[in-house]
Image (spheres, rainbow, N blue to C red):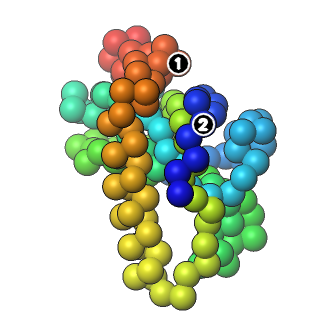
Amino acid sequence: MLTIISHLCSLSLSLSANLPTRALASSPALSRTGIYFGFARLKKPRVHLAEQDRGVYPFVMSLGYNPFYGNTQRTGEVHIMHQFASDFYGLEQRVVILGYLRPEYNYETREGLIEDIETDKRVALASLRRPLWQAYASDPFLGPGPGAE
């Protein structure tokens, strides 16, 4: 089930792959654990970033406790759906979170988890192709990519 929520929130984060806890607490729109989707762009480079990595890309995000792995702390993990040619650790990442896909589940097998991740990616990509969502790829919050600043 896809819950459509117009522009849940925008976050600017310095991170590697996981969102800092303080960013998660700052938005009431992110109070529900589960899988979210939207658009992301890398900002403020401290390392060389290949030209093809400077765009706005769709993402899915897991927000919660990842019960399959037995986590006790709430975390957010952003998966940008782009094959990066460069390392982006240490860069600021801006995300515009647009919608909620589903709650998080505890899986019996790793394969079941992977299957749902692939489904989440397909649903997010299909949703983000819609004109309503495509407009957010140009959201001013995402701004120009690295190298244009």
Q: Nearer the viewer, residue 11 or 45?
A: 11
Q: Position of residue 94 (x, y in %)?
A: 51, 30
The disc placed on residue 128 is none
Residue 87 shows up from this direction: yes
Q: In the picture, residue 115 is in which quadrant? A: bottom left
Question: Would you place residue 102 above or below residue 81 in this image?
Answer: below
Q: Position of residue 89 (x, y in %)?
A: 44, 44
| Tag 2 secondary structure | strand
Q: In the picture, residue 84 is in which quadrant? A: top left
Q: In the picture, residue 35 is in which quadrant? A: bottom right
Q: Residue at x 72, y 39 (%)?
A: 29
Question: Would you place residue 74 above or below residue 31 in this image?
Answer: below
Counting residues from the N terminus, which is met first, the one under dot 1 or under dot 2?
Answer: 2
Q: Amino acid at mark 2?
A: Ile
Q: Residue at x 63, y 34 (%)?
A: 8
Q: Can you say which quadrant of the picture contains the C terminus? A: top left
Q: Residue at x 29, y 45 (%)?
A: 82
| Tag 1 secondary structure | loop
Residue 22 shows up from this direction: no
Indicate left or right for 135 with 77 as reference: left
Q: Position of residue 98 (x, y in %)?
A: 54, 36
Q: Amino acid at mark 1?
A: Phe
Q: Nearer the viewer, mark 1 or mark 2?
A: 2
Marks 1 & 2, CB-CB < 8 Å contact: no
Label 1 packing within 10 angstroms: few (<14), some (14-19), many (20+):
some
Q: Residue at x 43, y 58 (%)?
A: 120
The disc placed on residue 5 is 2
**Residue located farthest toward the bottom when viewing the structure as drawn:** 108
Q: CA distance from mark 1 to mark 2?
A: 18 Å
Q: Which residue is mark 1?
A: 141
